[in-house]
Image (cartoon, helix red, strand yellow):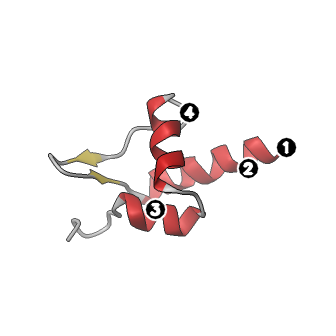
Amino acid sequence: MPKEGFYTSKEVCEKVGVSKNTLLKWLDQSLISEPELRTVYQFLWSEKNIENINEYIERRRR
């Protein structure tokens, strides 16, 4: 269970409509900002991170 106010990678993917592979590829290529928190087993994403991802998706659509 993620901390309150944070989302797992799976939840972020569902919110923004991309696969986990795509999300991690964008992260690896520094196309989106790093997650706010990182545990040994997972990334924890904030609303600010989700906004950044949505902005990147919008830029790609142009």
Q: Which of the labelled discs sits on residue 43, or is there none? A: none
Q: Earlier in the sequence, mark 3 or mark 1?
A: 3
**Amino acid found under the numbered disc labelled 2:** Glu
**Amino acid found under the numbered disc labelled 3:** Val
CB under 8 Å between discs 2 and 1:
yes
Q: Residue placed at 49% from the left, 61% from the top?
A: 13
User: Which residue was labeled with disc 1?
Assistant: 62
Q: How far is the residue under mark 2 from the one under mark 1? A: 7 Å
User: Which residue was labeled with disc 4?
Assistant: 31
Q: Which of the labelled discs sits on residue 12, or is there none? A: 3
Quarter the N terminus occupies: bottom left
Label 4 environment density (alpha carbons within 10 Å; few <14, some 14–19, many ≥20): some
Q: Residue placed at 55% from the left, 47% from the top?
A: 52
**Amino acid found under the numbered disc labelled 1:** Arg
CB under 8 Å between discs 3 and 1:
no
Instruction: Give above or below for 59 relative to 7.
Output: above
Q: Is residue 4 left or right of residue 24?
A: left
Label 2 environment density (alpha carbons within 10 Å; few <14, some 14–19, many ≥20): few
Q: Estimate the x, y position of residue 8 in percent, counting from the top left.
A: 33, 62
Q: Residue placed at 40% from the left, 64% from the top?
A: 10
Q: How far is the residue under mark 4 from the one under mark 1? A: 16 Å
Q: Estimate the x, y position of residue 60 in percent, counting from the top left.
A: 75, 42
Q: How far is the residue under mark 4 from the one under mark 2? A: 13 Å
Q: Estimate the x, y position of residue 38 in percent, counting from the top left.
A: 23, 45
Q: Earlier in the sequence, mark 4 or mark 1?
A: 4
Q: Earlier in the sequence, mark 3 or mark 4?
A: 3
Q: How far is the residue under mark 3 from the one under mark 1? A: 22 Å
* Image quadrant where residue 35 sits: top left
